[in-house]
Image: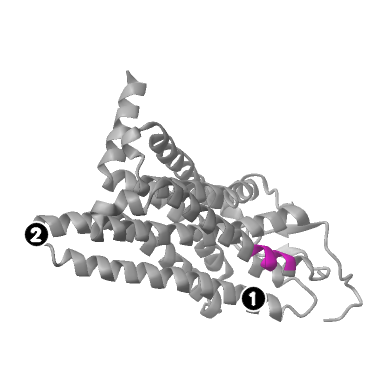
Amino acid sequence: MSSVNSTPSHPSAFILTGIPGMEAAHIWISLPFSGMYIITFFGNCIILYAVKIERSLHEPMYYFLSMLAATDLVLSTSVSPKMLAILWFNSREISFEACMVQTFFTLSFSFIESGVFLAMAIDRYVAICNPLRHSVILSNQVIIRLGLAILIRGLVLSIPDCFLLIRLPFCSNKVISFPYCGTGNVTKLACADFLINIVYGLAITILVVGFDVTFIALSYVMILRVAFRFPSRAARLKAFSTCSSHVCVILMFYMLALFTYLTNRFGHNLPLYVHVIVAIFYFLVPPMFNPIVYAMKTKQIRSHVLRMICFNRS
């Protein structure tokens, strides 16, 4: 690139663009997005509150569900408030430091969410394949260590990606064609070779997602093998019902992630606003979808939520 009109340095701020090409409809577009964030926020808070105060929910499955709810809150909150400020008030400027923080949180908590799904798959495997030793294998100490390992993995793998991004010089173009900062969005603005950024980002994504998806799939293969050996049809249906919520949220998360990647990789003929909306759905739909699915499919949580509603009305 020519350096005549550019100064290779860190800009004081970037400019986010909302939904490119649909600026006139920003207010209307914000309505479903704000509704999704409200459902996400209160739905996951209710899950956390229910698991905390209801002693019958102090089991490994619900501890992992609490981890998922907390991760969803952080992941959606790292993107939604700034995005809604852009859509409502045209507040498009974001400081370089805030942009880096947002990039770190979106990347690390995506990895953490994937790790939580793996932990939940392990829990379902132990509950169905070795139910008598479930509480021994997944004791409170084991759950705490597993949760810390998932958290540390997400943070440690994301830190080098952000340092690689910070070391890049940026030129005069400060406009990010998305309503949030992400590694791919920001890297494109650099006026230096960023091949190492691309290689590292792709490598850790394949490593983390590949590892998690492989062992999730293996756990469900073993669950199916055991479930089909159950003597009664009722026992098999109960086993499948126990796993149905987890399968639904896993499919939603990974399918949206895959669709986002395929859109960015091969959707060159698609309008830019399609890329942006698909990317936003990745951050908003799974965190909204997860508490709804678990509230509907898990009797203990559903009954507790109903008791809370009836108590407030009385």
> Which residue is drawn at the image coordinates 32% and 67% (left, top)?
219
Q: In the rendered view, would you say 196 is above or below 215?
A: below
Q: Quadrant of residue 7?
A: bottom right
- Residue 19 appears in which quarter of the rendering? bottom right
240 part of magenta stretch:
no
User: Residue 248 occupies which quadrant of the picture?
Assistant: bottom left
Query: Looking at the picture, how far across and down is residue 47, in whole percent?
Result: 40, 40
Q: Which amino acid does the dot numbered 1 rest on?
A: Tyr
Q: Residue at x 41, y 67 (%)?
A: 255
| Residue 238 x %, y % | 17, 54
The label shown at residue 300 is none
* Colouring used for the render: one colour
Which image quadrant: the N terminus? bottom right
**Badge 2 element:** helix
Q: Which residue is mark 1?
A: 200
Residue 309 lies, with reference to residue 275, above or below; the image says: above
Distance, label 1 to label 2, CA atoms, is 48 Å
Between residue 201 and residue 12, name the one nearer to us.
201
Residue at 36%, 39% (x, y): give it: 58
Residue positioned most to the left: 232
Q: Position of residue 116 (x, y in %)?
A: 45, 57
Q: Residue furthest top?
A: 314
Residue at disc 1, secondary structure: helix
Q: Which residue is mark 2?
A: 233
**In front of the other: 65 or 13:** 65
Q: Amino acid at mark 2?
A: Arg
| Secondary structure character of the magenta stretch overall | helix
